Amino acid sequence: GAGVSQSPSNKVTEKGKDVELRCDPISGHTALYWYRQRLGQGLEFLIYFQGNSAPDKSGLPSDRFSAERTGESVSTLTIQRTQQEDSAVYLCASSLAAGGYNEQFFGPGTRLTVL
Amino acid sequence: QKEVEQDPGPLSVPEGAIVSLNCTYSNSAFQYFMWYRQYSRKGPELLMYTYSSGNKEDGRFTAQVDKSSKYISLFIRDSQPSDSATYLCAMNGGSNYKLTFGKGTLLTVNP
């Protein structure tokens, strides 16, 4: 079956512009996660959705970052007024459920470059 | 001190070598330990996971967890050029969905 898909695969933007990154999780997966991977760094947790609710937004680095999920499916991560330090690969993952052990399946990521 | 420490390498070995990758961690609440493999410009894919302490073997791969030392390892036997990738350790607590990752170790297996 189809895995997690993300779009765009690459995004180049100018400092100060807003960007939207999209994630389509595996059908039926109730949990969805966003991570950020900066060059030479491990994945950094940003936000978690259970259904359409986000019980944990603790990883969002600033109020310029927001995310939503609709229809218990697609999710959008929005970064407003982008800064150069936002340059990273943004990875989305989904799992059947959350808690205990539930394998998180990752998408290919969106590579964001802020000039 | 970061919660999870992993030597980023790079690590270069000849084909057929035994590879040892490891991570240390500080959070004693971690119960699930995972190894992900990430090829260049791809998302991470789960290689193995282990619950609590112990060993787990899957083909050429063996994962070990020593909770008393807060140390986990991944061994790759008879390494192949196709094993060339970045290997990320990840872990979480029982009721915690959030994965905490190491930085990843870049491995190159030379033919």
Image (tube, grey):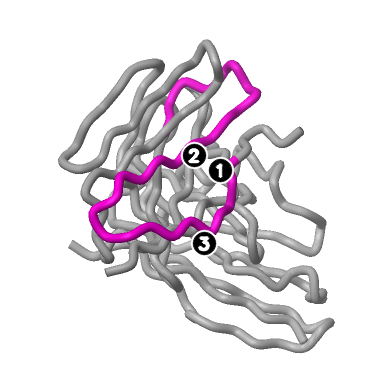
The vertical placement of A107 against B31, above or below, is below
Residue B81 located within the stretch drawn in magenta: no
**Most distant residue in the top direction:** B68
| Protein chain holding label 1 | B
Q: Disc 1, disc 2: CB below 8 Å?
A: yes
Which residue has dot 3 on it? A91
Range covered by the magenta-colored residues = B6-33
Q: In the drawing, does residue A33 fall left or right of residue A82?
A: left
Which of the two discs, 1 and 2, labels the residue nearer the N terminus? 2
Residue B13 located within the stretch drawn in magenta: yes
SS at mark 3 in the image: strand
Amino acid at pointer 1: Phe
Q: Which mark is residue A32?
A: none
Is residue A30 visible in this depiction of the protein? no
Image mark count: 3
Q: Residues within 10 Å of mark 1 (few under 14, many from 20)?
A: many
Q: Are marks 3 and 2 on the same chain?
A: no
